[in-house]
Structures are given as structure tokens and as C-alpha cells.
Amino acid sequence: MPQNCPCGSSKPFAQCCDLYLSGKSYPNTAEALMRSRYTAFTTSNLAWLRQTWHPDTCPELSAEDLTTDWQRLEVVKAKQGLKKSIVEFRAWFNDGEHERALHEISLFKLYKKRWVYVEALPQWP
């Protein structure tokens, strides 16, 4: 039986985020991009994270930045716009002793006709 995608879509990985991470396709919504980025974090795909991060805000990333034990993703809400979009999510991880959640409201913008992650927002606008 095919393994479900880490992004929580309930689709097989090969029919979901792997299409993006392997370069076969590119997400056409900010939510799909965010889900693929979560999957990139779970699979240590630095190349995809760099490719999908706005160049003005992308930090230096290394393999050491991808050691978190991610467990599951919950999309709280998403607002798709024409040039910018917002996705609120919780990404659950195990810190070695407890399960915790990273809660973020993320800003995405179109850059060279593709959605990219820009930054975390302090609150829903």
C-alpha cells in the first residue's frame, strides 16, 4: 500500500508532494506550497526549501536545521489571493519528551510567477 503524504492530505506521497519535491510540477496555491514545504522539512529536502523561499528572506540553511522530528500538519485556515496569500497552520513535532506544536501564520507571495514563502506574520491580518 502506498505511503500517505506527510502533509496530511491523505493522498499517496507519489501523487501529492512528491510531484513538487521531485520537480515534476509546481504548486499552484499557497496552501499546496506550504504543505510541500512541510513535507520538505520532514524529508530533509533543502533544495526545495531554498527554491520555495523568497530570496529576500531566505536564511542560510544546512542539514542541521532539518533535525526536528515532525509528526503531523494541521492547516487551520488559508486565504488565497492573486498576488499574496496567507496560510495558518500547526506543525506538530516531538521534542524528545513531549509532543509540541509550531503555530504560524505564513505570508506567501508570487515571485517570478510562482508562490514562495516570505515570512511568518505576528497575527492574522
Image: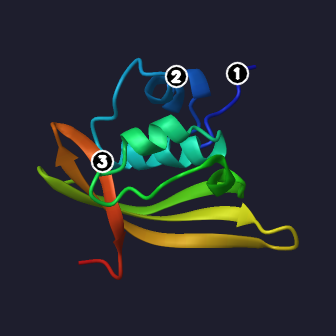
Q: Position of residue 48 (x, y in %)?
A: 46, 37
Indicate the quadrant containing the C terminus: top left, top right, bottom left or bottom right: bottom left
Instruction: Answer whether residue 12 is visible to the viewer in this image.
Output: no
Q: Mark 1 points at which residue?
A: 2
Q: Do the residues labelled 1 and 3 touch (CB within 8 Å)?
A: no
Residue 120 falls in which quadrant of the image?
Answer: bottom left
Which residue lies at the image location 42% right of the left edge and 21% below the top edge? 23
**Secondary element at tag 1:** loop
Of the residues shown, which amino acid type is indicated by label 3? Val
Residue 97 falls in which quadrant of the image?
Answer: bottom right
Of the residues shown, which amino acid type is indicated by label 2? Gln
Q: Name the residue under label 2.
A: 15
Report whether 81 appears left or right of 105.
left
* 41 is higher (above) or lower (below) than 99: above
Q: Name the residue under label 3.
A: 116
Q: Where is residue 76 in the image (x, y as percent from the top left)?
A: 45, 65
Q: Where is residue 101 in the image (x, y as percent from the top left)?
A: 63, 71
